[in-house]
Image: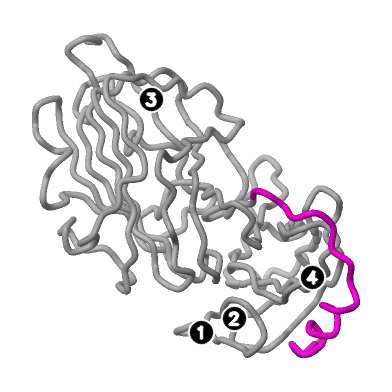
Amino acid sequence: MRILIPVLLVLAFACNPGTTQTETYTAYTIDTLHGVFGHWNPFGVLSTGNADECREQVIYPAAYLPPTSGNIIALEVSPHVTGTVPYKSLTISMGHTTVSSLTFSFATNLPVPVVVYTISNQSINWSSRSAWQRITFQAPFWYDGKSNLVIEFQKVVDRPSNPALGTISHQYNNRPMRKDLPWPVWADGSYGSGASTASTATYRYNAGPFLTRLIFPGQRTLTIDSSKISGKNYFYLGGTAILTVQAPPGEVFLDGIDFGLRSSGLQIPGVQGTWWLPALFNAFWMGVVDSQGKGICTLPIPNIPSLVGTHVYFQSATAGTTVGFTNVVDAIVAQ
């Protein structure tokens, strides 16, 4: 059905939201851990020592981030091969950009880096393939709610003190790999190679970004995950997509669906954020956020072979004391 945005304005006065939710997150590209495919950058290490230093950048399109400004306070990742990495140094920086893909020039991609996290001579135990592991920023990054986001990682592993260190990696997109999304770029090398401060990248990875959650204090967000069975991709025919709105308890939410994205977000008077889907507003689900701050929609995927390869986008709107939009999530129907 088609529900116009003015309905949300009515709902804003009709609902009685509960307490404000203190933390939400986005998951890029999916809120599901697989534990079966990983890469040694930007946090891991190779037993050969060939990746003891690394400088890597990833880019997150604005549509996949909350469309209102606010702090990013942490990120979460998960290992593929577990273990403890002794870092000589590890630095994470962030910055806004208007470009949609990364060049091999680190400075061009991130001309004004803002350091959000840095450690020296410390180890991190990457302990579980089935759980997200948090890095809490020492300085939150103020995201403007409209720009693409570049995140940079600079790593030096303390190989001299740990000559027998084995391989440790972190989970990337899998089943299927999302080669349609912006590709990360990096330079890596052995200890002392200077790769952590290289000016240019030497690799562009065609499997898309690694699995990441970004943590926000109270933004309205949307995540997507998928049922999973052996031998099947995510979002397989006959499977289920699960959409979860994160917002204050008691807010009304509407989930919208479309088959593309606008070239730039649409702003609507009286509504916070921007709308990225071409149609305004193809709503297929309506509900109330529960006491845990979640509004869940379980969406069956029809067992129709002609749907394989269909790229579907979702975005939600919430109504409480204010009316606003979430970020976009997407899925590609698979076999």
Position of residue 168 measured from the top left corner of the image (x, y, whole percent): 38, 25
Residue that label 2 marks: 275
Residue 190 vs residue 72, the one in the foreground: 72
Q: Are marks 2 and 1 in contact (CB under 8 Å)?
A: yes
Distance between mark 1 and mark 3 Cα atoms: 39 Å
Separation of marks 3 and 4 at Cα, in angstroms: 44 Å
Q: Which residue is mark 1?
A: 262
Q: State the SS at label 2.
A: loop
Residue 9 colored magenta? yes
Whole-Å distance between the Cαs marked 2 and 1?
8 Å
Instruction: Say what amino acid the circle numbered 4 marks.
Output: Gly
What residue is rendered at 24% in x and 24% in y? 157
Type of amino acid at the residue the image marks with label 1: Arg
Could you tell which of marks 4 and 1 lies nearer the N-terminus?
Answer: 1
Q: Which range of residues does the magenta coloring cover?
A: 1-23
Amino acid carrying mark 2 in the image: Trp
Q: Where is mark 3, residue-wise? A: 168
Q: Are marks 4 and 1 in contact (CB under 8 Å)?
A: no
Tell me the quarter of the picture where residue 4 sits.
bottom right
Residues marked 3 and 2 touching at CB (< 8 Å): no
Question: In the image, what residue occupies the spot 32% across and 54% down?
Answer: 184
Image height of 223 relative to 165, above or below: below
